[in-house]
Image (cartoon, helix red, strand yellow):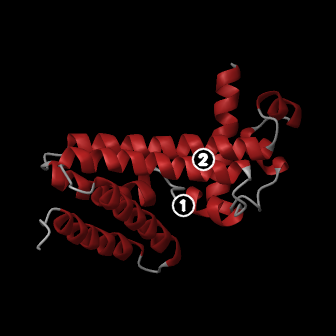
Amino acid sequence: MATATRDRIVAAGRELFARHGFGQVGLDKIVQQARLTKTTFYNHFESKEQLIREVLDLHELSLRENLAVAVERSDADPRGKLLVLFDVLPQLVCGELPGCNLLVSAAADFPNELDPIRQAVIRNKQAMQQMVLGLCQRAGAPDSDSLACQLVQLLHGAVLEQMLSAEPHRGFADARRLAGLAVDAAFVPPSY
């Protein structure tokens, strides 16, 4: 029962934070959405901030897992699998996992690097970086670290463009095209 209640709180927080932002959602809205009391909330979380960290961690874990499954199911060669990330992310952001902007929003709302929420943002960005780095290494990229950094920046840029643009899918299409160029360039032997 405790897990079901905690899950309900997390689901309510995720939905409200994705729709209204972190600063616009108070504890009253969360407990109302989750259909419970403040006492019950505090039996599961010390604070709204702890809930935000858990929402971020679970959401980003789900995002990475969905991306990893899509990449593994893809028939593409190892280099092509790097681009599958850019094919799947728009579906997740605009459909299956609404709220993919949570990490970007949290980074903007909690700029102090010592803030535990900002630490959750950094931790989740690093986890995404490690996932993409693993894909780059499996593809045999000579400078996997650099390529992974470029691809993650393009992924985050596409999410940000989706948040800001009247044409949300265009950012993903542009990011995929640029990712293709980055992948191709990463495998070109240096000319001396």
Q: Residue furthest bottom?
A: 166
Q: Is residue 183 visible?
A: yes
Quadrant including the N terminus: top right
Amino acid at circle 2: Leu
Instruction: Please name whichever residue, 103 or 5, is drawn nearer the observer in this view of the structure.
Output: 103
Q: Residues within 10 Å of mark 1 (few under 14, many from 20)?
A: many
Q: Residues within 10 Å of mark 2 (few under 14, many from 20)?
A: many
Quadrant including the C terminus: bottom left
Instruction: Please name whichever residue, 152 or 19, is drawn nearer the observer in this view of the structure.
Output: 152
Residue 132 appears left or right of 52: left
Q: Position of residue 160 (x, y in %)?
A: 49, 70
Residue 4 appears left or right of 141: right
Instruction: Please name whichever residue, 63 or 180, is drawn nearer the observer in this view of the structure.
Output: 180
Q: Residue at x 52, y 76 (%)?
A: 164
Amino acid at circle 1: Asn
Question: Which SS class for mark 1?
Answer: loop
C-alpha separation, residue under disc 2 versus residue under disc 1:
10 Å
Q: Position of residue 111 (x, y in %)?
A: 70, 64
Circle 2 residue: 56
Question: Which SS class for mark 2?
Answer: helix
- The tag earlier along the polypeptide, 2 or 1, is 2
Q: How many marks?
A: 2
| Image disc number at residue 101 | 1
Q: Residue furthest right?
A: 39
Q: Position of residue 132 (x, y in %)?
A: 34, 50
Compared to residue 123, the image places residue 38 above or below, namely above
**Tag 2 near tag 1, CB within 8 Å:** no
Image quadrant in which you'd find residue 84: bottom left
